[in-house]
Image: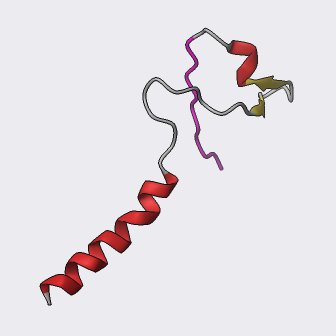
């Protein structure tokens, strides 16, 4: 029974490991998002600068 639970725990952790994003010290993948005025901004445009992304749901 213990082996079965261990296997289940390992299998449950695999998706989380696969979905993990870039680690500390690695480059984030480039992406482009529109702002509230529909102007597209690419992460590449802010290379070397601190970028904070805020996501929220309204309505």
Q: Residue furthest top?
A: 48
Q: Is residue 22 above or below residue 8?
A: above
Q: Is residue 1 magenta?
A: no
Q: Is residue 23 above or below residue 37?
A: below
Horizontal side, residue 21 vs residue 39: left or right: left
Residue at 76% across, 15% down: 45
Say which quarter of the image contains residue 39: top right
Foreground of the two, 56 or 32: 32
Say which quarter of the image contains residue 17: bottom left
Horizontal side, residue 33 vs residue 53: left or right: right
Find residue 15 and report its horizontal and vertical position in percent: 46, 64
Find residue 9 and report its horizontal and vertical position in percent: 27, 72
Residue at 13% across, 84% down: 2
| Residue interval drawn in magenta | 50-59
Horizontal side, residue 21 vs residue 28: left or right: left
Foreground of the two, 43 or 35: 43
Residue at 51% across, 42% down: 21
Horizontal side, residue 31 vs residue 25: left or right: right
Assign the N terminus to one quadrant of the image: bottom left
Q: Is residue 56 magenta?
A: yes
Magenta span: predominant SS is loop
């Amino acid at each position: 029974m213990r082996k079965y639970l261990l296997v289940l725990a390992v299998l449950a952790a695999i998706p989380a490991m696969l979905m993990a994003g870039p680690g500390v010290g690695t480059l984030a993948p480039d992406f482009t998002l529109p702002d509230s005025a529909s102007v597209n901004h690419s992460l590449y445009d802010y290379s070397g600068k601190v970028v904070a992304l805020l996501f929220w749901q309204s309505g």
